Amino acid sequence: MKRLTPAFKRFVVLRNPVSTNAEQVQRRIQELHELFPETLMDIIETSAAGKDGTRRRLSRHAHLLGPHTLLCIGGGDGTTNLAVEWLVQGKGVPAAARKTPILPLWGGNANDLAHMLNGVMYRGRLKRLFAKAKIVKVYPLQCHLAEQNTEPRVHVAVGYIGFGITAAVALQLNAAEHRHSRWRTVPGVRFIGELITLFQTLLGSTSFAIEEKGNVRHLLERSYVNGSRMGKLRPIATRLTDKTFIETDVHRKDRHVFAIWRWLKESMRPRPTHKISKSSTFSCRDTLWMQVDGEPARVAKGTQVTVSRSAKPFYALSTQTGKLRS
């Protein structure tokens, strides 16, 4: 079969054994073996100790990475985000390792980056992917959190960052009772359950206050979107490799389902009315929750938030190069 240029000398698979569709990931790993029987393959499992444990495992294998190694992500958007954040800003990561291209294997629930890079994937299409795909450079979003009396935190987001409603939804979807529910194993039923969770969260949402350019604003949601999907919603009217990102707000006065549906619909217009940004800064007047690629995190009152493009890119294998406008 036709090989990529440059040809990959090794596959490293970061596999989350408890992610949604973990069995499907295992089939794709086997397919890689069959397509490239002579290519070296190493499998790293995510750590039960959490993100820090997984980062340490990646660091121990950093010598295997580089431009001629393909890092396959056998997990969902959270696992993908962890890998990208480590590649972009991890401490002590060798310069060659930072140039490692990634390939998400559609192993999670939403799989937003996997779909943006390579569309919908069914079993048996990896052969066509490897014959067609090219390596693209993507500059992710970067969220700098300057909290009072503590060291600043920096989060990297492949696709989106949200404060308010989307963070509350992410918090509910990541709760143990939700993740371990039996209905999550049934795709159609899982989607209905997620919609129910979404609308229950919307109806129970509360506003938060931010200070921006000297003005206090009361919002239900502040979102930053890079790419064409956000939590399975598509197509958002921006592309993964655009040099700008979309900034959207839902105001306190819009606290009803129809207004929020209008906000979602507006996000999908080819020419949205939302603000096109290169950088955004505000201060939190309340303690609130944020989500980064669907992973929730708490933000303390008084934190100054700055969202911009990362100065450092990550690299990915993609068949959607025209649509990405790389």
Image: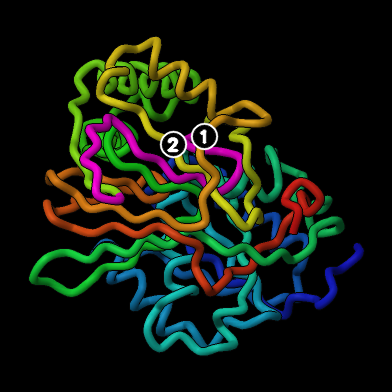
Circle 1 residues within 10 Å: few <14, some 14–19, many ≥20: some
Cβ atoms at labels 1 and 2 below 8 Å apart: yes
Find residue 280 and report its image quarter.
bottom left
Q: Is residue 36 left or right of residue 181?
A: right
Quarter that holds the N terminus: bottom right
Disc number for residue 274: 1
Whichever of callouts 1 and 2 sits on the residue coming sooner in the sequence is 2
Residue 8 seen from this side: yes
Q: Is residue 314 left or right of residue 295?
A: right
Residue 132 at x, y percent in the picture = 85, 56
Reply yes or no: does residue 129 show up in magenta: no
To which residue does mark 2 refer? 248
Vertical placement of residue 206 versus 93, above or below: above
Residue that lies at the very extreme toward the left in this rendered image: 149
- The residue positioned 39% from the left and 19% from the top of the image is 260
Residue 37 at x, y percent in the picture = 75, 69
Q: Secondary structure at mark 1?
A: loop
Q: Is residue 324 left or right of residue 288?
A: right
Residue that lies at the very extreme toward the right in this rendered image: 2
Disc number for residue 39: none
Task: Read off the magenta span.
Answer: 213-232
Q: How many marks?
A: 2
- Measured in 3D between alpha carbons, the distance from the residue under mark 1 to the one under mark 2, in whole angstroms, is 6 Å
Quarter that holds the C terminus: bottom right
Q: Secondary structure at mark 2?
A: strand
Residue sitting nearer the eye, 218 or 82: 218
Residue 290 at x, y percent in the picture = 28, 46
Type of amino acid under label 2: Thr
- The residue positioned 52% from the left and 73% from the top of the image is 311
Residue 80 seen from this side: no
Residue 322 at x, y percent in the picture = 81, 50
